[in-house]
Image: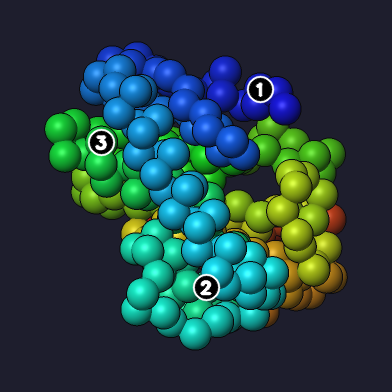
């Protein structure tokens, strides 16, 4: 799959590279090109998940929260807990969870980084982040950009859509975007809110749900309507 949106990343001052293993393909901006170390970590995380799924099938298939398992690998429990908070199945948090685990590893030696995993982001920048979003809705296509300023703190930006990408969505949202300091939770919440939106009138319900869960911000698009709330500034 061609990820043409990666061509729009500002890579000035960063090493920029991709790391792939099985079904995961990461685009990374970091202070150094340590792709081989990151590959080994990505491989480890995916193999841990695959091994756990072989023992607990519901982890892969459930569309509802499942019980915490103290014997599960760390990455699996991160997903279970994030999904439980959002009231979705654990696989709704997989891209965000992996992105943050990779990002936290990079931040041991770098002050800044961006990890993009299937359109979901974990980032920590020493400047306000300017983020463009993609939708195939003709009223908003190539027009939506927002900024987030969390005073150099790391955070996640995750999206879900019934129109774009391979992820399962039970709603009809053109786009659901969630910003939170926990990237796995942002990923799970993007799915949960996208599931809610079947009509334009459901955007308000999705915003209220996101607010009740304490996220940093959210943005929703359905047909001719856009809803936005939280600590983000719409630029265009």
Q: Decide: marks 1, 2 in contact (CB < 8 A)?
A: no
Say which residue label 1 marks.
4
Q: Classify mark 2: residues with Cα within 10 Å, few (<14), some (14-19) or many (20+).
A: many
Q: Residue at x 69, y 32 (%)?
A: 142
Query: Left or right: 77 with respect to 204?
Result: left
Q: Secondary structure at mark 2?
A: helix
The Cα atoms of the two marked residues, 1 and 2, are separated by 29 Å
Q: Classify mark 3: residues with Cα within 10 Å, few (<14), some (14-19) or many (20+).
A: many
Say which residue label 2 marks.
83
- Mark 1 or mark 2: which is in front? 2
| Image quarter hosting the C terminus | top right
State the image coordinates of residue 67 (x, y, percent, origin top left).
49, 85
Q: Which numbered marker is on residue 106?
A: 3
| Image quarter hosting the N terminus | top right
The Cα atoms of the two marked residues, 2 and 3, are separated by 25 Å
Q: Is residue 20 visible?
A: yes
Q: Secondary structure at mark 3?
A: helix
| Mark count | 3
Q: Classify mark 1: residues with Cα within 10 Å, few (<14), some (14-19) or many (20+).
A: few
State the image coordinates of residue 186 (x, y, percent, origin top left).
48, 61
The Cα atoms of the two marked residues, 1 and 3, are separated by 24 Å
State the image coordinates of residue 143 (x, y, percent, origin top left).
67, 35
Q: Residue at x 78, y 74 (%)?
A: 201
């Amino acid at each position: 799959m061609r990820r043409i949106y990666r061509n729009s990343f500002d890579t000035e001052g960063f090493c920029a590279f991709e790391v792939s293993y099985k079904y995961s393909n990461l685009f990374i901006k970091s202070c150094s090109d340590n792709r081989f170390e990151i590959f080994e970590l990505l491989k480890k995380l995916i193999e841990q998940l695959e091994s756990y799924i072989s023992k607990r099938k519901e982890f892969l298939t459930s569309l509802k929260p499942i019980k915490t398992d103290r014997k599960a690998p760390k990455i699996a429990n991160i997903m279970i807990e994030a999904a439980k908070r959002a009231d979705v199945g654990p696989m709704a948090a997989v891209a965000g969870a992996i992105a943050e685990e990779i990002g936290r590893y990079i931040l041991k030696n770098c002050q800044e980084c961006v990890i993009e995993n299937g359109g979901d982001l974990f980032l920590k920048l020493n400047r306000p982040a300017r983020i463009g979003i993609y939708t195939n809705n003709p009223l908003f296509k190539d027009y939506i950009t927002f900024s987030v300023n969390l005073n150099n703190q790391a955070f996640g930006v995750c999206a879900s859509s019934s129109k774009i990408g391979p992820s399962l969505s039970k709603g009809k949202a053109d786009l659901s975007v969630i910003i939170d300091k926990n990237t796995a939770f942002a990923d799970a919440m993007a799915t949960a809110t996208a599931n809610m939106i079947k009509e334009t009138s459901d955007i308000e319900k999705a915003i209220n749900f996101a607010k009740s869960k304490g996220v940093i911000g959210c943005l929703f698009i359905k047909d001719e309507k856009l809803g936005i709330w939280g600590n983000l500034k719409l630029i265009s």
